[in-house]
Amino acid sequence: MSTTAAADRTTATALRTDVAPVGPRQDRIGRAIMALNAVAALAAFASGLVITAGVTDDRLLSEMWRTLAYLVFAGIWTVLAVSPRRHPGLWELLLLHKGAVTVFAFVMWDRLADAPETALVDLGVTVTTLVAYVLCRGWRAWGREHV
């Protein structure tokens, strides 16, 4: 074996050992948080169906769009709960959306009737998703080792 190949192998091994393994307990907690977020989104979907049934025609499309979005978010949280390190960018996309909605709702707190509730709910799911991201080490989806 050449000196260069041996050095490359040593460097690669050192890099792998520098990365702390995902602890099974932390991983289970993070996955459970994501599963709870998915269940909450399904509950919001059910609530959205009730709300949609009672709106006027001029609000029907936007309410149905919002209601169906809850299914999309439930699906994303479920995918991440099942395989938190196999989908590069999914965690970050989810955090970007929930964080942006949270910021917007706080900015609109005094101007829109539903802004305070939206701000607090989305803050909750942003924080829980971020905690799960850290516990599951979601950024590792970008690496070669997908678990």
Image: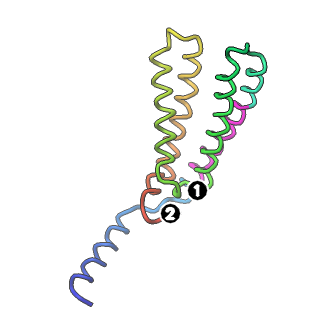
Q: Tell me the residue at 50%/13% (across/down).
A: 109
Q: Which residue is mark 1?
A: 83
* Foreground of the two, 57 or 140: 57
The picture places residue 49, in percent across and down from the top left corner, at 76, 27
In the figure, 145 relative to 6: above or below?
above
The picture places residue 19, in percent across and down from the top left corner, at 38, 62
Q: Is residue 77 left or right of residue 134?
A: right
Range shown magenta: 28-45
Q: Residue furthest left?
A: 3
Mark sitting on residue 56:
none
- Image quarter where the N terminus lies is bottom left
Q: Is residue 45 left or right of residue 128?
A: right
Mark sitting on residue 146:
2
Q: Tell me the residue at 72%/26% (across/down).
A: 48
The picture places residue 118, in percent across and down from the top left corner, at 57, 22
Q: Amino acid at mark 1?
A: Ser
Measured in 3D between alpha carbons, the distance from the residue under mark 1 to the one under mark 2, in whole angstroms, is 9 Å
Question: Badges 1 and 2: C-beta atoms under 8 Å apart?
Answer: yes
The picture places residue 10, in percent across and down from the top left corner, at 29, 77
Q: Tell me the residue at 47%/56% (across/down).
A: 141
Q: Is residue 127 magenta?
A: no
Q: Residue furthest bottom?
A: 1
* Foreground of the two, 136 or 71: 71
Q: SS at mark 1? A: loop
In the figure, 22 relative to 63: above or below?
below
Label 1: few (<14), some (14–19) or many (≥20) C-alpha neighbours in 10 Å: some
Counting residues from the start of the chain, the first of labels 1 and 2 encountered is 1
